[in-house]
Image (tube, rainbow, N blue to C red):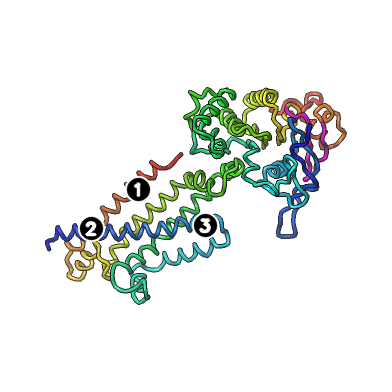
Amino acid sequence: MDLRSELASLTVEHLELVLVAVLIAAAISIPTGILLTRRTGMRRWVLGIANVLQTIPSLALFGFLIPVPLIGGIGKRTAIVALVLYALLPMMRNTLTGILGVDPAVRESAVAMGMTGRQVLWQVELPLAMRTILAGVRVATVTTIGTATIAAAIGGGGLGVFIFRGISTVDTTQILAGAIPAAVIALLADEGLGWLERKLSPV
Amino acid sequence: MSAIVEFREAGYSVARDQGSSEILRELTFTVEAGETLVLLGRSGSGKTTALKMINRLLSPTSGEVLVEGKPTAAWDPIRLRRRIGYVIQETGLFPHFTVAENVGLVPRLEGWSPERIHVRVNELLEQMGLPSREFSARYPRELSGGQRQRVGVARALAADPPVLLFDEPFGALDPVTRLDLQKQFLALRNALNKTAIFVTHDVREAMMLGTRVGLMRNGRLELLSPPGEFLQAENDEARAFLAGLDWKTEGNGPSQ
């Protein structure tokens, strides 16, 4: 396979890893963030756990997961699990911050107008927190694009394949072939999600 | 006249580190249909707490509050709140809703048809002196403080609730705008014949708007009387408030 077609396929693979990981992480962390706004007692614990996950060096986390049954092993699945664990904190924290940041007077008047808890959440809290939540999604996505290069270390594929091969063969061209597209994707994602953030924010 | 809101030895206390602290003590009074009862008091006197017990934003920790003869605890809170309009300072408008969406909120929650909501919103905006052609599509941040407050009143009136609660609605406005809104309040009250409970720390506002004035201090209702009698009251807290009205005679000069 020539470099060009390999670049194309690895880029697609990389995007798949990122997309799946961010979507799963969003599906877990945004509802959890919402729950944490209601359960003050759980807040410290859950955020603490997410924080600790964030501090594990990424290469080590990928390594730790290999022997874990069901989610572990060599390959994409393990890589996605690791990426999900990394992406949880920014989205969870921003969901929590965004909702808690809604003006208490606005929330109170929503309740006083006779909105149900669900209506307050969907019609008032989430729209007003949308910008902050999307900022969390943006941070998580950009970070994941970078971290996903390490997936290649455990056979997860993606642009990291170039980088690890380049390191082992001391071939700078290969390293750059992985690093530059990853950086470009990260910049584009940052721009695109930033645009979405401005577009969807209500105020 | 009949009681539409009734406090029966309603108390409210919150747990603190050392025991509990009483915010309201055995509050007992009734609000008759059609009257404007003003609760006057200093900050921390419990007047806002009392107000929030009417639409069950807070529940009494002792005694009970009745609305239309039924204890608030027995009401479905959602139904209860949709029968009670609520106006707070301008910050209570939804910043992500247009003026029309803010005003049409309760009718929409109540499942009115879009046409009926549209007609109602326009009618209310015109009534509040905000031509709908000009204001419907604006967002709260594009309005002046006085305009926002008018939208707040229109929103509270939207589903035609029999009872309206006002929590220092005009407190943040400049004196001229405030006077405008107070006059408009009186005109609306005479036209609509609603029951209103109005919380304020401004004795002038209390005298102007209230058919009866309740004076609150330290969680108790010290005095409840029509403004005319209130002016003659011997109560020292009442005198302290009334002193603000006749500063001229005491020769203190204008304070601002």
Label 3 vs label 2, nearer the camera: 3
Q: x%, y% of residue B144?
A: 54, 29
Amino acid on which disc 3 is placed = Leu
Residue at position x 48%, y 24% in the image: B134
Query: Image check: A11 left or right of B109?
Result: left
Q: Is residue B76 magenta?
A: no
Label 1 vs label 3, nearer the camera: 3
In the image, which residues are magenta? Answer: B209-225
In this figure, which residue is indicated by the disc labeled 2?
A11
Q: Nearer the viewer, residue B49 or A139?
A: B49
Looking at the rendered structure, the secondary structure element under dot 2 is: helix
Co-location on one chain, circles 1 and 3: yes
Residue at position x 35%, y 48% in the image: A193
Gap between marks 3 and 2 measured at Cα:
36 Å
Mark 3 and mark 2 lie on one chain; the one further toward the N terminus is 2
> Residue A35, labelled with which disc?
3
Looking at the rendered structure, the secondary structure element under dot 3 is: helix
Mark 1 and mark 3 lie on one chain; the one further toward the N terminus is 3
Most common secondary structure along the magenta stretch: strand
Task: Work out which residue is located at the far right of the displayed protein and give it.
Answer: B234
Q: x%, y% of residue B224?
A: 82, 35
Q: Quadrant of residue B234?
A: top right
Mark 2 and mark 1 lie on one chain; the one further toward the N terminus is 2
Amino acid on which disc 1 is placed = Leu
Q: x%, y% of residue B42?
A: 74, 39
Crowding at dot 3, Cα within 10 Å, few <14 / some 14-19 / many 20+, comes out as some
Amino acid on which disc 2 is placed = Thr
Task: Output the chain of dot 2.
Answer: A
> Residue A193, labelled with which disc?
1
Looking at the rendered structure, the secondary structure element under dot 1 is: helix
